[in-house]
Image (tube, grey):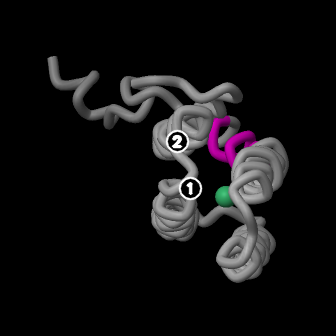
Amino acid sequence: MNLPKLPLGVPLMDRDHAVLEHMFSTLPQTRDAELLPLFEAIAQEICDHFSREEIMMEREQVPILSCHKAQHAALLREVETMRAYLATADARVQRHQIGFVLAHLVANHVGGVDQVTSTFLTNRSAKSPPESDCAPQSACMAS
Ligand SMILES: [Fe+2]
């Protein structure tokens, strides 16, 4: 698995963040006419990633779930605002919005609430006793 710039130690997050980083990295080679399709592909990936992350956080009962989901919703609203703005912007502005504004929104999210969430998840799994410690005593006393 390719690791993102800021690995968080949660496979779903790291895998999805690496995919998004790769998509942003294609911007310099993207022709002007392909900028809006690239934006749409990134926007879809962000939306899909947030859905996967929210399912995982609900399953893992992450305590800051409602705050994290609110930040997802806020970022998706920014994406919607950006979509309308990009429709009438020239290629120079489109490149700036995708490669700087949107990329920083995602990076700030990863370094903020995603990192807090990953700390909770990794600390909790570190506190869980290893499988061998959970073996029923009767198995040890069988002989
Ligand atoms: Fe997130």
Q: Which numbered tag is attached to residue 9?
A: none
Question: Label 2 sits on what residue type?
Answer: Thr
Q: Quadrant of ligand 1?
A: bottom right
Q: Position of residue 32 (x, y in %)?
A: 57, 51
Q: Is residue 23 depicted above or below 89 in this figure?
A: above
Q: Which residue lies most toward the left here?
A: 143
Q: Is residue 117 left or right of residue 100?
A: left
Decide: few, some or many residues near mark 1? Use Cα within 10 Å; few <14, some 14-19, many ≥20. Answer: some
Please give the name of the residue rendered at 47% of the width and 62% of the height, measured from the top-left corner: 37
Please give the name of the residue rendered at 37% of the width and 24% of the height, measured from the top-left corner: 132
- Residue 121, can we see it? yes
* Labelled pair 1, 2 in contact (Cβ < 8 Å): yes
Please give the name of the residue rendered at 55% of the width and 45% of the height, measured from the top-left corner: 20
Image quarter of residue 93: bottom right
Magenta stretch prevailing secondary structure? helix
User: The residue tagged with tag 1: helix, strand or loop?
Assistant: helix
Q: Is residue 142 left or right of residue 108?
A: left
Q: Position of residue 77 (x, y in %)?
A: 74, 80
Image quarter of residue 72: bottom right
Segment colored magenta: 115-122
Camera-side residue: 23 or 50? 23
Camera-side residue: 51 or 58? 51
Residue topped by disc 1: 35
User: The residue tagged with tag 2: helix, strand or loop?
Assistant: loop
Question: Label 1 sits on what residue type?
Answer: Leu
Mark sitting earlier along the chain (1/2): 2
Residue 119 shown in magenta: yes
Q: Quadrant of the N terminus?
A: top left
Q: Which numbered tag is attached to residue 30?
A: 2
Q: Position of residue 44 (x, y in %)?
A: 48, 67
